[in-house]
Image (spheres, grey):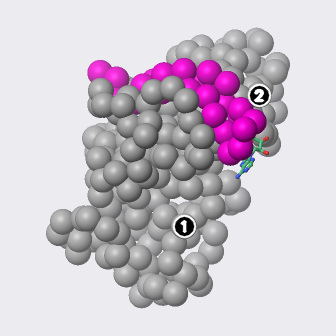
């Protein structure tokens, strides 16, 4: 069953179109990865899904409802989670308090405790100010904050950017578990091969368009995809 259907969307930050007719779907239980060259429009696509793009044409169906004109807050409240490319945490609050201040979450303390189970590295840091965390720890906290509301879809923009190789594996391992928790994943990644290896399907973007798409295993085996987009890791 399709949960998210991005239907032929266009738009951008000004009168210039950055997205030029992008079509994409995510089904229940899926991990879908979007890869592509720098500046292809991957972050812009995620922003469009989250209602953060100033100008947008086309429809975005979320569980069958068109949310293309809904506010970001409404999208978050209807079950879409978001971890931006630059981790958004409250630097002056402790790790624990960052989890407790997530809006609209019932049984917030119990959910926070669940997050410490899901992200054990955060447990010993619970009383530390988020501003004192390393980049990788902050990324995990932003991830945990997005999961507090138990979203049915989470949008991740380069979740492993700037992480050490050991942490990259940890984050990918955490992403793999999300569908079991009832949360489908739409992620943008620079680490194209590694991301596709844990995905069911992939999209390759180039200059605001979907250049190629299909089962992730097929893209990883496609000579043209490998030559043009997947040949070397960033
Ligand atoms: N806030 C912004 N205002 C204007 N142009 C932007 C903004 N963010 C991104 N762009 C432009 O949109 C294009 C796509 O950017 P982006 O979606 O960030 O690419 P990617 O995430 O694939 O690297 C680029 O040409 C970039 O310069
Ligand atoms: Mg980007």
Q: In this view, does 223 lie above or below 29?
A: above
Looking at the image, residue 197 sits to the left or right of residue 186; the answer is right
Q: Residues within 10 Å of mark 2 (few under 14, many from 20)?
A: some
Where residue 46 sits, quadrant-wise, is top right
Q: Nearer the viewer, residue 198 or 207?
A: 207
Residue at x 56% of width, y 36% of height: 56
Q: Which quadrant: the N terminus?
A: top left
Q: Magenta segment, which residues?
A: 1-25
Residue 202 % position (x, y): 57, 25
Magenta-colored segment: predominant secondary structure: strand
Residue at x 61% of width, y 28% of height: 10
Q: How crowded is mark 1: few (under 14 residues within 10 Å), some or many (20 or more)?
A: some
Residue 71 % position (x, y): 41, 50
> Marks 1/2: CA distance?
27 Å
Residue 191 % position (x, y): 69, 41
Where residue 163 sits, quadrant-wise, is bottom right
For mark 2, what is the residue?
207
Residue at x 82% of width, y 19% of height: 227
* Pair 1/2: label in front: 2
> Please, what secondary structure does the residue beneath circle 2 have?
loop
Using the rendered image of the protein, determine whether residue 63 is visible from the camera's viewpoint. Answer: yes
> Please, what secondary structure does the residue beneath circle 1 have?
loop
Residue 39 % position (x, y): 77, 39
Q: Is residue 212 magenta?
A: no
For mark 1, what is the residue?
88
């Amino acid at each position: 069953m399709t949960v998210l259907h991005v239907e032929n969307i266009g738009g951008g930050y000004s009168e210039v179109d950055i997205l030029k007719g992008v079509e994409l779907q995510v089904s229940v239980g899926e991990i879908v990865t979007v890869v592509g060259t720098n500046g292809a429009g991957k972050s812009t696509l995620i922003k469009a899904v989250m209602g953060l793009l100033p100008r947008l044409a086309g429809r975005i169906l979320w569980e069958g409802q068109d949310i293309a004109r809904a506010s970001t807050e409404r999208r978050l409240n209807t079950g879409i989670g978001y971890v931006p490319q630059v981790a958004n945490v409250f630097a002056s609050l402790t790790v624990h308090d960052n989890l407790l201040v997530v809006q609209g979450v019932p049984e917030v303390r119990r959910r926070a405790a669940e997050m410490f189970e899901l992200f054990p590295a955060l447990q010993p840091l619970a009383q530390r100010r988020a501003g004192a965390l390393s980049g990788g720890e902050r990324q995990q906290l932003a991830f945990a904050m997005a999961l507090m509301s138990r979203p049915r879809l989470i949008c991740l923009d380069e979740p492993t950017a700037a992480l050490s190789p050991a942490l990259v594996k940890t984050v990918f391992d955490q992403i793999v578990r999300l569908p079991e928790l009832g949360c489908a994943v739409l992620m943008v990644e620079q680490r194209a091969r590694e991301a596709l290896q844990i995905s069911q399907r992939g999209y390759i973007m180039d200059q605001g368009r979907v250049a190629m798409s299909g089962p992730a295993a097929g893209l990883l085996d496609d000579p043209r995809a490998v030559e043009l987009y997947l040949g070397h890791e960033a």
